[in-house]
Amino acid sequence: MTARSNRQKSDQDPATWMPAPQVHCRYIGEWAATEHRWGLAVDQAEREALLTYAAGCPDANLVFERAG
């Protein structure tokens, strides 16, 4: 990401902000890996956005597990 796009993103998740289309697949993969690594919660809007974008990525395999 460029400094400019990082400023535009601010603290938004994929439900409200995405980078340029040519990097969507890489971005959602890194986003999901970071959420998993840190044990962060994914809300419904974020989950739906990630799954929607992943559908356009031929090598994407996103799985959401419920805790507890």
Image (cartoon, rainbow, N blue to C red):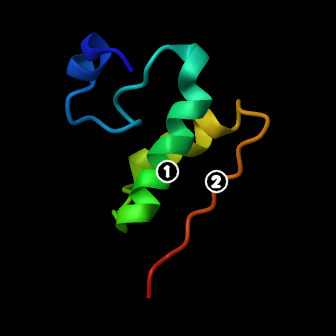
Residue contact between numbered discs 2 and 1, judged by CB atoms under 8 Å:
yes
- Determine the residue located farthest toward the bottom in the rendered image: 68
- Which structural element holds mark 2? loop
Q: Is 4 above or below relative to 9? A: above
Q: Residue at x 50, y 39 (%)?
A: 49
Position of residue 33 measured from the top left corner of the image (x, y, whole percent): 50, 53
Question: How many angstroms separate mark 2 from mark 1 (CA)?
Answer: 8 Å
Find residue 40 and report its image quarter.
bottom left
Q: Nearer the viewer, residue 46 or 59?
A: 59
Position of residue 60 measured from the top left corner of the image (x, y, whole percent): 71, 43
Question: Which disc, if any, is residue 49?
Answer: none
Mark 1: which amino acid?
Ala
Q: Work out whether mark 2 precedes mark 1 in sequence or the reverse, and give the earlier one.
A: 1
Q: In the picture, which quadrant includes the C terminus?
A: bottom left
Q: Which residue is mark 2?
A: 62
Q: Is 31 above or below relative to 58? A: below
Q: Residue at x 55, y 72 (%)?
A: 65
Q: Residue at x 41, y 46 (%)?
A: 46
Question: Which disc, if any, is residue 32?
Answer: 1
Q: Residue at x 41, y 36 (%)?
A: 14
Q: In the picture, which quadrant includes the N terminus?
A: top left
Position of residue 39 measured from the top left corner of the image (x, y, whole percent): 37, 68
Position of residue 53 measured from the top left corner of the image (x, y, whole percent): 60, 33
